[in-house]
Image (cartoon, rainbow, N blue to C red):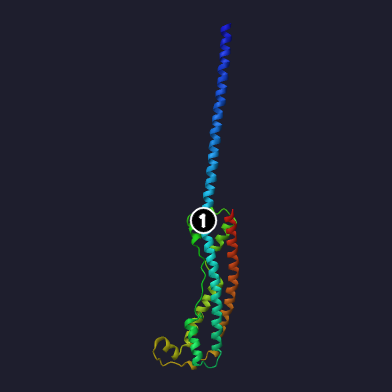
Amino acid sequence: MITFFRKIRQKMLNENKLSKYLLYAIGEIVLVVIGILIALWLNNLNTISQNKEKGDIMLLEIRENLISDTLLIHEISTFNAEKSSDISKFMQIAAQKKVSPELGEKMFFLLSEGKLFTNASFTPNSTGYKTLTNSGNIEIIANTELRNQLTQYYLKTSIAAFDELLNLTRSFKYYILPKIMNREFVKKVTNLDFQIRNLEDIKLNEDEKMVSDLILILANINQNEQASVELKKELAHLIALIDEELKK
């Protein structure tokens, strides 16, 4: 009988040790799991921090590009103001019944040195954005609104008003050059004396198409300015969004 009770007691002691071991083992497993979760959490935080840093670097480059676009728009506005002035001067000369040698000198200067036949074009500086998209990590910009608006901005391949002015200027150039060609102009350019009409024989004040073309160009320059104002607003908005994102 005594032996029987000893066996029971030993069995209970063994069971108690097993329970303690199981609790210890479970505790070890829990600690390992918690350690893994903490490591994953820290790694995730590190990844987020690294992505934020990379995204900020990309945004800073894009911001610089947008600032250069803004400066270019200002330059285009200045150019168009000078172009309008040159057109007005040319029209004042063309309105005369007879182009005097003095007026001919002014006309020649406007045609050769002025902005009658030239345009200022606008192409967005997309260096930073292309670097971002080519990397395949455009999602690195966490701000969805900013990302979408940047995409829309850089999808613009051209500005309609700017393209229209380019076409109008080109058309006017090829129309007016034969109309104003004269002996004095050719001699200035080539130092050769061609037996063609003289400066005083030019009758620009009777040319309806020339007048209508110039008026149309002036009207289009005004449209350019309106487009430039809207574009500057868009650029300012994008730069403000980037600044807010960089502060986060």
Residue underneath mark 1: 57
Image position, residue 234 (x, y; %)? 59, 65
Nearer-the-camera pick, 168 or 105 = 105
What is the number of callouts on the image?
Answer: 1
Q: Is residue 200 above or below residue 36?
A: below
Q: Residue reaching furthest left?
A: 192
Q: Residue reaching furthest front?
A: 247
Residue 21: in sight, yes or no? yes
Q: Quadrant of residue 246?
A: bottom right
Q: Residue at x 56, y 62 (%)?
A: 152
Quarter of the image where the N terminus is located = top right
Nearer-the-camera pick, 6 or 153 = 6
Q: Quadrant of residue 153?
A: bottom right
**Amino acid of disc 1:** Ile
Q: Quadrant of residue 190?
A: bottom left
Image position, residue 247 (x, y; %)? 59, 55
Q: Is residue 196 above or below residue 77?
A: below
Q: Residue reaching furthest top?
A: 1
Q: Residue at x 52, y 78 (%)?
A: 169
Q: Secondary structure at mark 1?
A: helix
Q: Is residue 57 above or below residue 88?
A: above
Residue neighbourhood size for the residue with mark 1, other residues' Cα within 10 Å, grouped as few (<14), some (14–19), many (≥20): some
Q: Residue at x 58, y 6 (%)?
A: 2
Residue 213: in sight, yes or no? no
Image position, residue 61 (x, y; %)? 51, 60
Q: Is residue 102 above or below residue 221?
A: below
Image position, residue 168 (x, y; %)? 53, 78
